[in-house]
Image: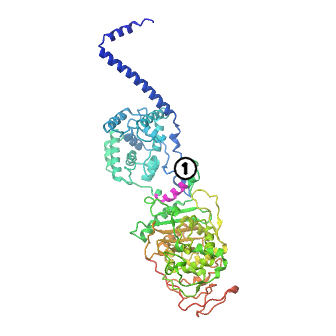
Amino acid sequence: MPPLPAILVSLRARYRRLPRWFRYISGTFAVLALIGLITFGLIWHHYSSLAATFDMTALTRGQNETLIMGAKGEPIGSASDIERELVTLTDVPITLVQAVIATEDARFFSHPGFDIIGLSRAAVKNFTSHGIRQGGSTITQQLARNAFGLQGRSYERKITEIFLAMRIERECTKEQILTHYLNRIYLGTGCSGVGAAARCYFGKDVHDLTLVESATLAGIIKAPVAFSPITQPALAKQKRDLTLQRMAETRSITEAEANAARALPLVISHDKNRVRTGYMLAAARAEFQRLGFRPGTPPEMTMTLRLDWQHRLDTLVRQHLDTLAPKDKALQGAVIVLDNNSGSILAMQGGRDFNTSPFNRALDGVRPPGTAFLPLVYAAALTTLPDVTDAPQIDGPLDNKQAMIGGLVGTLGEWGAEGEPVAYTGGTITPIQALLESRTAATVRLGYQVGLDPLRSAINRCGFTTPLRTEAAFTLGQSPLRLIEFARAFTSIANDGRQCATPHFLLTPTIRSTEVFAPAAIAHVRDTLITGMERPEYRKPLLAHGLANKSIAGYGGITYDRTDAWFIGSDRDLTCLVWVGHDKDIPISAKTTASTAALPLWAAVFAMVTEGKPKGWDAKAPASQLLATPLRALFVEGEARVIRVTPVSGVVLGNDPYQSTSAPGGVPSAIPLPQDDYVPKAIPVPQ
């Protein structure tokens, strides 16, 4: 063994002269230090290797979103549940950068990814609180946690976060890190990034933010829910003022500027587009996912939504419900506007308020249509058995056992009429007149004449996903239906028996329009509905919106217990459905009618979407030639006309109720009607 150098020999000699206890302690510390150094090296190697496995493209991957646009190219929102509007650092005002750094990471430009001072302060806090309460995270650490989905509070997660932050600092500049952070940080109300948050809370681009607004956004970061300017304005202002104080302490602004800003009130200009398009946007996002698209591919998708209509529709629904029942905030409404051919949903409202009730009744709601269902019943009946067009039905009471509406006993009520209670003639009534007057007893009798099973099968060609009841009650709309499916089925009345393509928001579906009813049957039904729009009780709402004397095929209805009110109508291009009711089976009111509960809203919406000029049908020459002047004469504003109509052909009778006029084509003459046959006066529409 070669001799030790002289200096080492000297050191060893001196060490041996030290007290034994000192040598023991110092040796122990030396061994522990060596073990600690080795352990530290192993830990460093482990977490460095672990950090190296993460894909750095994750810093930008989540920022590639598909932007959903309106029909006219207006941006509506992101295809994901999180709103994001990408910005560059040059777009961001310096006051916002200063506010974020002052409140989140004052030493951002000097640390290597982690802040030893902040970590030490957090360690002391955690030790005294006997748990992990603070993390001391820098902006870079927050970015790592957000981009790579590091969840939970543990020391292992914290160490991984630190090593990832150091790697990010090595591979990105401070400006790039700050840009990624400002585009990713969650700021509440579904907003990710300062761009989306600026538009949500202040209704402006991020580069237009003031000092006070910048401080407000920076104050939200730590607790977006607790410090939300919308739901917690007092706490948000308190946090904003603390941020301004920190900015003064870091000399980003002067003390005078901070004091002046703190004296200002918290002013929020919440982006109402997010509420007004809430139902449509949520539905479009669901369809986006169902079609298998991924965020960012494609970068933009155009909705069928007309944003200008949607803004007004949201207001119209709220105003109508508040007017109809000012104290009943549980009363809901839904509206659907469909393109009769393509199936595009052009406007839709799923309820009173998306924020308080995001359930979309227009798409997912299932409610009984009541007597509003009668047009489809008669279209199916005339398709299944065309001869019933001229088949007289008994105009008299019906044993409820044959309908089973609300029970098994008693006489079936005539709740479909909008005017006074129906007085049965004791004679007969044509199916067309029964449809015109929403007669329930005659409708049930027609169902039995055609056959309930064939009639049900014909109606099911519309593709309803909810089953129709087996008893005759389905003929009176007592089977709950999806609102969107009901609206689609009604487009067949405008399309000569072909219902529109599958309703959609984004792309043209693969399923095209299909014929569900015979064109001749639809012609009869459509002409009846056009005539029915001249009811006196319909007059005022239609006049108010410039729709009177327009050739529109519309029909209203209610359920027997008045829990649901409907109005649905079409011109050549569009179909609009309106439903009003509760989510539970609660009556709207004891005197609810379709003309008071649903028609005013329908008229307002239809006038809006047609710009007051609906492309109706020629009222002078209806396609079926069945409902020309005779039935139109039934409805005369301001009085009840005593009109005699043949129950077979619809030909007007003379003054003698037993006089008959032979119908063309050898149709049998009229059956005599009683002297007291009349059309009830209308119930005035409330002011």
Magenta residue check for 280:
yes
Q: Residues within 10 Å of mark 1 (few under 14, many from 20)?
A: many
The one nearer the camera, 673 or 90, is 673
Q: x and y percent of residue 449 in the render? A: 62, 79
Say which element carries label 1.
loop
| Picture layout, residue 47 above or below residue 464 | above
Query: What residue range appears in magenta?
Result: 275-286
Q: Which residue is mark 1?
A: 66
- Residue 529 visible from this viewpoint: yes
Q: Is residue 264 left or right of residue 175?
A: left
The one nearer the camera, 449 or 668, is 449
Magenta residue check for 382:
no
Marks counted in the figure total: 1
| Picture layout, residue 266 above or below residue 419 | above
Q: Amino acid at mark 1?
A: Thr
- Residue 618 visible from this viewpoint: no
Q: x and y percent of residue 61 in the render? A: 53, 42
| Picture layout, residue 347 above or below residue 629 | above
Q: Residue 103 falls in which quadrant of the image?
A: top left
Q: How is the image coloured?
A: rainbow
